[in-house]
Amino acid sequence: KQVNSTIGRPDIQKLDGAVQDREFGLFITLGAYSSDARTYEQMKPNLRLIDGPELVELVVTHYQKLSSAYQTLLPLQATYIPKPLSVE
């Protein structure tokens, strides 16, 4: 599902309703979640919400552990940006 708005609690509750006993629900968005959605997540230990910044952080952190097939699909290159020298 592609949306440009904040994901609210009703969408999270729909996912929760589809999750069976002993299953886990994962909802990923490149956008954000409402505070009500985050509160609902905290009440449900079998649900996990991942937003855009967290997804990027997970990819960057674990990129080297991905198989070469996935690295080919998502080619990343490390870039070093030096810290500017302080001028005094």
Image (spheres, helix red, strand yellow):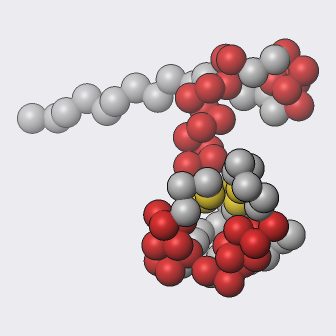
Question: Is 53 drawn above or below residue 40 in the view shown?
Answer: above
- Using the image as rendered, state which of residue 34 and residue 15 is in the foreground: 15
Q: Is residue 51 visible?
A: no
Quadrant (top left/top right/bottom left/bottom right) for the N terminus = bottom right
Question: Is 10 drawn above or below residue 38 in the view shown?
Answer: below
Name, please, the residue furthest toward the left.
88
Image side of residue 73 versus residue 24, left or right:
right
Where does residue 28 sit, x and y in percent of width and height? 70, 57
Q: Is residue 11 visible?
A: yes
Name, please, the residue furthest toward the front.
21
Where does residue 32 sit, x and y in percent of width and height? 59, 69
Question: Is 52 drawn above or below residue 13 in the view shown?
Answer: above
Quadrant (top left/top right/bottom left/bottom right) for the C terminus = top left
Image side of residue 75 versus residue 8, left or right:
right
Question: Is 41 drawn above or below residue 37 in the view shown?
Answer: above
Q: Quadrant of residue 71?
A: top right
User: Which residue appears at 65% of the width and 67% of the height?
Assistant: 31
**How many discs appear?**
0
User: Which residue appears at 50% of the width and 23% of the height?
Assistant: 80
User: Which residue appears at 59% of the width and 37% of the height?
Assistant: 58
Where does residue 56 sit, x and y in percent of width and height? 62, 44
Where does residue 20 sit, x and y in percent of width and height? 78, 58
Q: Quadrant of residue 37?
A: bottom right
